[in-house]
Image: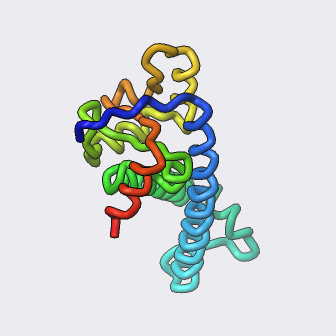
């Protein structure tokens, strides 16, 4: 990849994060429904004992194990969402809409370990605030830690990446 694109600024990153947040919220809701259904099935089968008349959601919240499993599932779904898209095309749904791409410093797709490190370092999007003070490099905390860049693409390059996924 010989073409270099400028690094993305804060506001485009923020707009992309808003788009992706809507998708992640939907995936989290689906995860919660499936988890709740699985717990209810285990209660119905007698594998888990739930006190008569106890609220099912309260039952999960009051059990450290069930609450921990639910939390791990939510974090895992978020990491898999971002890591999958970043490693496949360099773009999540929101990034595609705002013509952004995450890549290595050499311009290649990032690896799964880089994607996971990037997710954890993003601190729920707060890592992007570093871009506001890093005028020269326009890099977020997660960019520095995972050795990646987020670049702003041209319309033509964005279309090329999208077409190459078929």
* Residue 67 left/right relative to 111: right
Q: Nearer the viewer, residue 51 or 37?
A: 37
On screen, residue 114 above or below 69: above
On screen, residue 132 above or below 19: above
Q: Nearer the viewer, residue 134 or 97?
A: 97
Residue 87, given in percent of the width and then of the height, sits at 32, 51
Q: Nearer the viewer, residue 46 or 93?
A: 93
* Residue 92 left/right relative to 40: left
Image quadrant assignment for residue 145: top left
Image quadrant assignment for residue 119: top left
Residue 101, given in percent of the width and then of the height, sits at 41, 43
Which quadrant holds the N terminus? Answer: top left
Residue 65 seen: no
On screen, residue 34 above or below 93: below
Residue 54, given in percent of the width and then of the height, sits at 73, 70
Q: Nearer the viewer, residue 155 or 34?
A: 155
Which quadrant holds the C terminus? Answer: bottom left
Residue 86, given in percent of the width and then of the height, sits at 37, 49
On screen, residue 147 above or below 98: above
Residue 163 seen: yes
Image quadrant assignment for residue 110: top left
* Residue 2 left/right relative to 41: left
Residue at 43%, 56% in the rendered image = 159
Residue with the most extreme front position: 156
* Residue 114 left/right relative to 31: left
């Amino acid at each position: 990849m010989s073409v270099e694109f400028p690094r993305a600024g804060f506001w485009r990153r923020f707009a992309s994060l808003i788009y992706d947040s809507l998708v992640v919220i939907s995936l989290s809701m689906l995860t919660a429904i499936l988890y709740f259904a699985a717990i209810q099935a285990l209660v119905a089968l007698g594998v888990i004992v739930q006190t008569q008349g106890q609220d099912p959601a309260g039952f999960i919240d009051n059990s450290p194990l069930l609450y921990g499993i639910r939390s791990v599932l939510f974090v895992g779904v978020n990491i898999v969402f971002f890591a999958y898209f970043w490693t496949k095309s360099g773009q999540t749904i929101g990034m595609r809409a705002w013509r952004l791409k995450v890549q290595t410093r050499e311009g290649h797709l990032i690896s799964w370990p880089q994607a996971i490190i990037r997710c954890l370092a993003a601190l729920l999007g707060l890592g992007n605030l570093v871009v506001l003070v890093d005028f020269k490099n326009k890099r977020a905390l997660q960019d520095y830690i995972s050795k990646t860049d987020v670049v702003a693409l041209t319309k033509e390059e964005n279309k090329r990446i999208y077409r190459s996924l078929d």
